[in-house]
Amino acid sequence: MGKRSFYTDDDEISSTPGLTSAISPELETKQVVQIDDNTKFVKGKLIKTFPQLEQFSNQWRKWLISKTDVATAEYDNLKSAVNNEISTVTNKTSELITEPVLPSTIYILTAALTGSILSNRRNIAVRFLAPTVFGIASFKYFMPHSFSNVGNWLYQLEGEYVPEVQKFQDDTTKSTNDLIAAAEQFQKETNDSLVSSVKETRQYIMDWVSKK
């Protein structure tokens, strides 16, 4: 090999010293020499294997693949569950909230904030109840249909999970309604009696005056 020209193509120059041509099949067959169970010559190169390391690597690779598959399956299940929950919440919200969210929500938040401001110097119970009562009252006023839907939904949940509380609430509501009805009936009877008494007294006075 002569001097290398500066403009010579690099592909024609081998960076590895020695013979660069392929080994003939006859020589290749002769080059495969088994030294022991783990060492042999192949194509003029010494190949040494480690069965224990190969076995450990194979087991570790299978373990890693199985764990990756399990993690992927768990992730897919969790992702599907989260998507289902989000879809359920979205559908339920659309079912319950029938009026426009804006500007009603702003009014409700303003009312709750007003209750918080008015009860700022009160005790902790009043400071907690005031904004809640103001918010619920404004919710019922500005979004009556949604308020009714939410109330019915909460009533159903109450029956499913805490039926004792629902029964107590129903009994209390019935007793209150009966008491209100009895009070209204008593008021009506009292008014009728008073009107009748006034009418009779007035008639008696007119009759007494006419006799004079």
Image: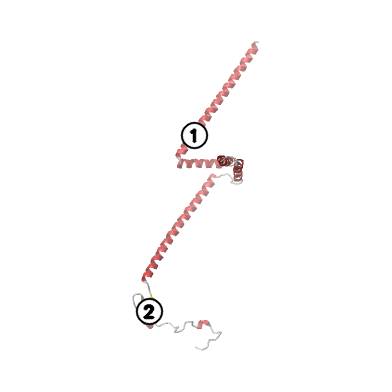
Residue 25 x %, y %: 38, 82
Residue type for callout 2: Phe
Q: Is residue 209 left or right of residue 18?
A: right
Q: Quadrant of residue 202?
A: top right
Residue visible at 38% across and 70% down in the picture: 53
Q: Decide: is 93 above or below 205.
A: below
- Tell me if label 1 and label 2 are in contact, CB under 8 Å: no
Q: Quadrant of residue 121?
A: top right
- The number of discs equals 2
Residue visible at 63% across and 15% down in the picture: 205
Is residue 140 in sight in this rendering?
no
Between the C-alphas of marks 1 and 2, the distance is 95 Å
Q: Secondary structure at mark 1?
A: helix
Residue 66 x %, y %: 41, 62
Q: Nearer the viewer, residue 21 or 172?
A: 172
Residue type for callout 1: Thr
Q: Nearer the viewer, residue 168 or 212?
A: 168
Q: Earlier in the sequence, mark 1 or mark 2?
A: 2
Q: Decide: is 71 above or below 124.
A: below
Alpha-carbon neighbours of circle 1 within 10 Å: few (<14), some, or many (≥20)?
few
Report the disc number at residue 172.
1
Q: Secondary structure at mark 2?
A: strand
Q: Quadrant of the C terminus?
A: top right
Is residue 82 in sight in this rendering?
yes
Judging by the rendered image, the residue that carries numbered circle 2 is 41
Residue 58 x %, y %: 39, 67
Q: Nearer the viewer, residue 97 or 116?
A: 116
Residue visible at 51% across and 49% down in the picture: 89
